Image (cartoon, helix red, strand yellow):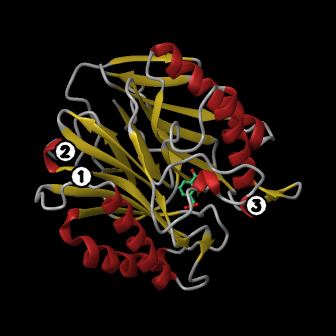
Amino acid sequence: MGAVAFGAHRPSVLAAEYPSTWVAMPVVAGGMHAAPAVSGGTIPTVSDGAIIETWISDRPVVRDAGEGIASARNDDILFGCLEVDEDNDLQAATHRAYCRLFDRIDRLGYPHLLRVWNYFPRINAEVDGLERYRRFSVGRHDAFIAKGRVIGSKDVPAACALGSRTGPLVIYFFAARRAGQPVENPRQTSAYCYPAQYGPRSPTFSRALLTRTGDRPLLFLSGTASIIGHETVHIGDAALQAAETVANIGAVIKQAALDETDAGISLLLKAYLRDPAYQPMIEQHLARSFGNQAKVVYLQADICRADLLLEIEGVRLHTSLMAATV
Ligand code: 3EB
């Protein structure tokens, strides 16, 4: 369905035949483990020092590139990606990008946004008195409203928003013919209810979103960090932030009420670190909580709050949904 490269340089292997994009984000570790899914799942493979996250469908796909959005869809689900020039106004560019995205998925009949990944440079930089992440949040929020989405419980996808090194605003996403089930975290305020101290418009995402592929559950986990209620906790302490983040991931998974006794579960995760030196420490925390279920790619990135040192997102799926590794 599509491929997304993460690395300091754009790898040469990305083909034009399928939706693909590149995020300028250095790889710290991980990647050879691999594994994707049929209609949802990922195979991280390594090429030119980049990680390639690959999404595979077990059914035929139709590809096209309307309105600047490359997409591939099967009967149930649509993968799409777009690269957007900021044109000196991130907020307006984000608004336009999301309006275009909604127009596209509405027209093709996949109106339910399940999961969105957002990347852009200088995420913590302030422009005219407002942090760029918050400008992004305003543009996104207003586009949800403009395109008739109901913010709060209903039309909120799982998401993440991270700072890349350079390049355009890169967005990739899954949308579906049928709605998924948003999941919140009882330890955290829902992001769409954050108070105004985090920006003039709340971020539009759920903590996780549950969908099905074949007859198996597929849980998209949003970017998860060291936040309790709406406040960052353990400011300045990466080890405690890692422990709290892992506890939050555990809480969201528990909230999704999936079969925890199932032996064939994998967690395909991306961990974003402000400092590569955190990698062994985070690996320990993930191993302690999830054992060998967790397959993790570590990337160096800026996090959307200046006081967050790390963030983790990914997908929880049955191992049978992962294609064989090459
Ligand atoms: C948080 O919990 C940390 O703006 O799309 C996590 C996941 C975060 C998604 C987004 C932001 C986003 O608020 C930041």
Q: Is residue 42 visible?
A: no
Instruction: Name the N-terminal-most of marks 1 and 2.
Output: 1
Q: Which residue is the site of mark 3?
A: 125
Q: Residue at x 59, y 35 (%)?
A: 150
227 is higher (above) or lower (below) than 157: below
Q: Which residue is the site of mark 1?
A: 34
Q: Are marks 3 and 1 in contact (CB under 8 Å)?
A: no
Q: Identity of the amino acid at label 3?
A: Ala
46 is higher (above) or lower (below) than 92: below
Helix, strand, or loop for circle 2? loop
Front residue of this view, candidates 73 and 27: 73
Q: Are marks 2 and 3 in contact (CB under 8 Å)?
A: no
Relative image position of residue 274 (x, y in whole percent): 55, 71
Q: Is residue 168 visible?
A: yes
**Closer to us: mark 1 or mark 2?**
2
Relative image position of residue 184 (x, y in whole percent): 45, 55
Q: Quadrant of the C terminus?
A: top left
Q: Which residue is the site of mark 2?
A: 322
User: Is the residue marked 3 within 8 Å of ligand 1, measured from its CB?
Assistant: no
